[in-house]
Image: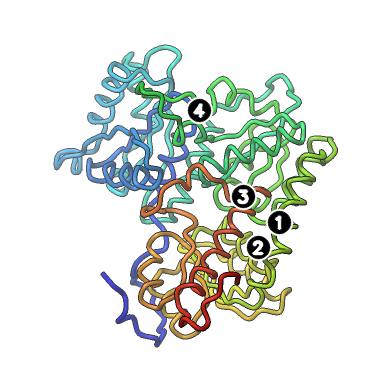
Amino acid sequence: MLLRHTHKEIRDRSALTTNPAKTCQPVGALYAALGVHRCLPHSHGSQGCCAYHRSMLTRHTKEPVMAATSSFTEGASVFGGMANLTQAIENIFALYDPDVVAVHTTCLSEVIGDDIPQIVKSATDAGKIPEGKTVIHANTPSFVGSHITGFANMTKALVEYFAEPGTVPADRINVIPGFVEPADMAELKHLAAEMGVESLLFPDTSGVLDAPMTGRHEFYPEGGVRVEDLRTVGGSRATLALGAWASAPAAEALEKKAQVPFEVLDTPIGLLATDRFVDALRRVGKVEVTASVTRERGRLVDLLADMSQYFYGKKVALVGDPDPLIPLTEFCLTLDMKPVHVVTGTPGKRFEERVRGLLGEAGVEGNVAQASDMFHFHQLIKNEPVDLIIGNTYCKYIARDEGIPLVRHGFPVLDRVGHQFFPTVGYRGAMRLAEKILDAFLDRIDREPDEAAFELVL
């Protein structure tokens, strides 16, 4: 449905969300579970919920996303889903032979009050879970938080179920990447390797949702963090949690369980956030920044210098998840752009404080909102038009109605292909992001002028 009838007048709304700027917790939990090798996510609720979660991730990644469901019917909805989940566990191990089944709840099973640990214990006592296999769980009610909350809860569950205190110390750094693309996770590993730092990324969807086509179906692709590695995260030197919303809860849980110190950093999007990530690798890993990483940074700086004339003073509106939005706002300011509207659907007042701080330091006046929606985002743009929108696929309706270029970034991106293969984190990712932003501006300049103003070189 087109949004051209959205009105400019903004009124306070406390009980109505229109076009949410987020999706539900199980989607994030399912994505995190896919980052464990030989793990089959399981949705404890109705078939419809599981179908939605799978289709959202399948359409975003263009890969077949596998997940099982408890297939609630009217009976389970009234009397609870214990029988359904117990039968599902037995069937899953018999048919699909995963190492891990990662159960996440839905609104319905949360309202019923199903006790997942108790159900799993009963299944274990009944011999329905084969030796050496594990069933983990995370509570992910969709009426609280967002898909980022679900990702954080399932990642925290990986720590709670697998991390073993007293593990033999390893000269290694844990990296919790946050809800980013598979290519971003690969880029984080690339940067750590270039720095000479041994790292363990969890969860890790690289090699799972960007797996190569070999002509042979692999139900469990080669990628994903191994269970045996997850059991040793308690012996790592430290943890770098990339994103306060998606990654910090797991890092805090690991410190509490195994006394592994942690730092919470921004998702390394853009020049400055990547600098901070590289510096953290240097400090914690006790290494020096290598010449190869310095060259990557230098190429980015050179590119930004070449592009700077086109970015200066351009107004931009950003919407998406809080962890990437903060460094994205900072990156736009680095490019001398003005982020005048910054909106996330995920709750968290710290988001507003952080973004307002960035804008204040740069002397930019902007609208910042958390736990908001796309309707509000559109109203802000109507009141103060911008030169560019950065956000997910749902922004295309606003971009069309307002005649504003759109750079697709975040989750979900349903109408473009390839984003799972091209990172936007790290120095190389910043180069790609800057190129996409500049192309959006230049394409518009090429599209709109009359013949007299049409130039070969802009």
User: How would you rate the neighbour count of disc 1 (Cα within 10 Å): few for under 14, some for 14-19, many for 20 or more?
Assistant: many
Cβ–Cβ below 8 Å for labels 3 and 2?
Answer: no
* Residue 452 % position (x, y): 51, 83
* Residue 361 % position (x, y): 73, 73
Mark identifier at residue 271: 1
Callout 4 amino acid:
Gly
Mark identifier at residue 223: 4
Callout 2 amino acid:
Phe
Cβ–Cβ below 8 Å for labels 2 and 1?
Answer: yes
Residue 27 vs 312, above or below: the answer is above
Give the CA separation, mark 4 to mark 2.
30 Å
Q: Image point 50% across, 36% down: which residue?
A: 205
Q: Image point 49% across, 29% down: which residue?
A: 36
* Residue 370 % position (x, y): 51, 67
Q: Would you name the residue on which mark 2 appears?
A: 331
Work out which residue is located at the far bottom of the displayed protein and give it: 9
